[in-house]
Image (spheres, grey):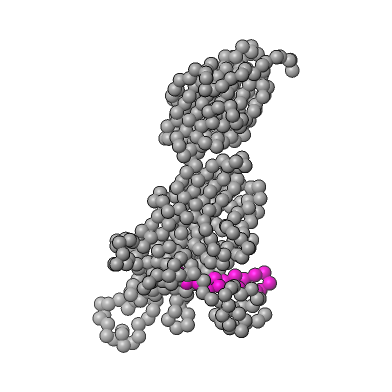
């Protein structure tokens, strides 16, 4: 390697000459922009542009530079970050990428020598601005050495209930706002890799809530809360209806786009995911409908669910208005006691209150229980009712659906022990209230049974 003296000039992006630049059609369905020979070139990127190329001042055809000594400032729309990948090749030149529109924070330091090319990896701005500096001017080292071939992509960071951004720790965080009350539907159609998942929602210890996660967690992830899924809905103790939710297991991770009930154990303050250095993928998709543990919902020839009950959710703020086909067949989980409706902690039938100006509603990423339709046998009428009924009146109708449904949360451990929590579901918020539990002698207690055994209501079968 021959030696050369090359002094990096003292410069400031904001004081050099600048002009607006437009992205150029490359004739092959793509867009590109060249580095300026001098000064600062500023590019305002339209929101409909997903990606474009950045070349040295020689352009896409020559891919080399002898004249560059300038800054390229890229401005994305608000709510986006800029991601850079690609190759840089240079000898006795300088190549840097900065966060923002100044040299205050360096994201990539390419030094002054990359004869065989250097892969910049994946670089992400913290905001919607990023600056590229490339200098090869006045250094005559031949046309084969200095060139840029970079791809810049626009990455949306604000999706309403979810934001994806580079944090102060240098990692890409997906922040899930579990209390999001906005009207924007959560849609992330293309997979986005993140280094961390933050879940912001107030949770009460040992009180279940419903949750829908648009995240595929990597193997090795640990979660500090218990996730439960629907096992069955049935009549118990005569006419009472009960839904059984079963713990998915300590070594099983919650799946994306799948409805769950979540319980935060004692000693925890918030739902947390430890990815153990791996990457998670954030993407919304069709919401899975759960008809029972380890069992797919049965479908007819038209793809319609034939099971009596299923658990589902929503990625949008949802209101059940008069013409909603789910009205009368859907059950939300209650956060508060409702006069003439579901008690806190019960599944309550979602119905319109004629005395209220508001419709029953659910926030994004909440889940609810659904009855398929009114034509499936639920509660059989007695013989006298059947005789009195007109033959044209359905024996099993929407009027036979229960107003509220109790919930039993069952957790089996590896040693054969079983813990059972009892709760009930709100026609508005989809939250749970826990009922008082019982100890081994059938006495009511104020906390969860931790003793080993299989619990069935007030009874325990010792093992």
Q: Magenta residues: mostly which secondary structure? A: strand
Q: Which residues are magenta?
A: 408-425
User: Percent position (x, y) of residue 25?
Assistant: 44, 25
Q: Position of residue 152 (x, y in %)?
A: 52, 31
**Left or right: 296 in relation to 6:** left
Residue 176 among magenta residues: no
Of the 4 image quadrants, the one containing the C terminus is bottom right
Question: Is residue 295 placed above or below 4 in the rendered structure?
Answer: below
Q: Count numbered badges in the picture.
A: 0
The image shows residue 233 at horizontal and vertical percentages of 47, 72
Residue drawn at the location 49% of the way across and 69% of the way down: 433
At 52% from the left and 65% from the top, the residue drawn is 208
Q: Where does residue 328 sit, x and y in percent of width and height?
A: 35, 68
The answer, for residue 268, to whether it is visible in the render is yes
Q: Is residue 420 magenta?
A: yes
Q: Which residue: 56% across, 32% down?
A: 99
* Residue 306 against residue 109 in the figure, above or below: below
């Amino acid at each position: 390697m021959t030696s050369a003296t090359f002094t990096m000039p003292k410069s400031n992006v904001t004081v050099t000459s600048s002009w607006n630049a437009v992205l150029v059609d490359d004739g092959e369905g793509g867009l590109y922009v060249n580095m300026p020979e001098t000064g600062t070139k500023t590019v305002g990127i339209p929101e409909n542009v997903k990606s474009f190329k950045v070349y040295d001042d020689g352009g896409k055809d020559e891919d080399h530079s002898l004249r560059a000594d300038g800054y390229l400032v890229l401005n994305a729309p608000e709510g986006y970050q800029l991601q850079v990948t690609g190759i840089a090749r240079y000898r006795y030149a300088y190549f840097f990428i900065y966060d923002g529109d100044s040299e205050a924070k360096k994201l990539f330091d390419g030094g002054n020598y990359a004869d065989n090319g250097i892969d910049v990896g994946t670089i992400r701005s913290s905001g919607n601005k990023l600056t590229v500096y490339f200098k090869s001017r006045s250094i005559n080292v031949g046309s084969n050495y200095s060139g840029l071939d970079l791809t810049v992509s626009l990455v949306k960071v604000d999706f309403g209930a979810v934001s994806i951004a580079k944090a102060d720790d240098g990692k890409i965080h997906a922040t899930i706002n579990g209390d999001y009350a906005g009207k924007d539907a959560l849609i992330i159609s293309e997979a986005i890799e993140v280094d961390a998942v933050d879940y912001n929602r107030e949770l009460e210890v040992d009180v279940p809530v419903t949750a829908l996660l648009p995240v595929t967690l990597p193997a090795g992830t640990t979660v500090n809360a218990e996730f439960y899924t629907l096992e069955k809905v049935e009549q118990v103790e005569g006419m009472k209806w009960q839904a059984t939710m079963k713990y998915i297991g300590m070594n099983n991770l919650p799946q994306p786009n799948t409805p769950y009930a979540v319980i935060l154990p004692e000693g925890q303050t918030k739902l947390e995911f430890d990815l153990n250095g791996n990457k998670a993928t954030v993407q919304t998709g069709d919401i899975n409908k759960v008809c029972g543990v380890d069992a797919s919902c049965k479908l007819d020839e038209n793809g319609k669910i034939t099971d009596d009950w299923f658990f589902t959710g929503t990625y949008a703020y949802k209101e059940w208005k008069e013409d909603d086909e789910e009205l009368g067949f859907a059950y939300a989980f209650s956060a508060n006691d409702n006069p003439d409706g579901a008690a806190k902690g019960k599944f309550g039938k979602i119905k319109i209150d004629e005395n209220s100006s508001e419709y029953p509603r659910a926030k994004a990423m909440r889940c609810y229980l659904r009855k398929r339709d009114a034509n499936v046998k639920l509660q059989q009428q007695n013989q006298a009712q059947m005789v009195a009924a007109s033959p044209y009146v359905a024996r099993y109708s929407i009027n036979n659906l229960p107003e509220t449904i109790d919930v039993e949360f069952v957790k089996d451990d590896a040693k054969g022990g079983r813990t059972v929590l009892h709760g009930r579901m709100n026609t508005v918020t989809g939250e749970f209230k826990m009922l008082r539990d019982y100890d081994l002698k059938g006495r009511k207690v104020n906390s969860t049974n931790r003793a080993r055994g299989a619990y069935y209501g007030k009874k325990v079968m010792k093992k």
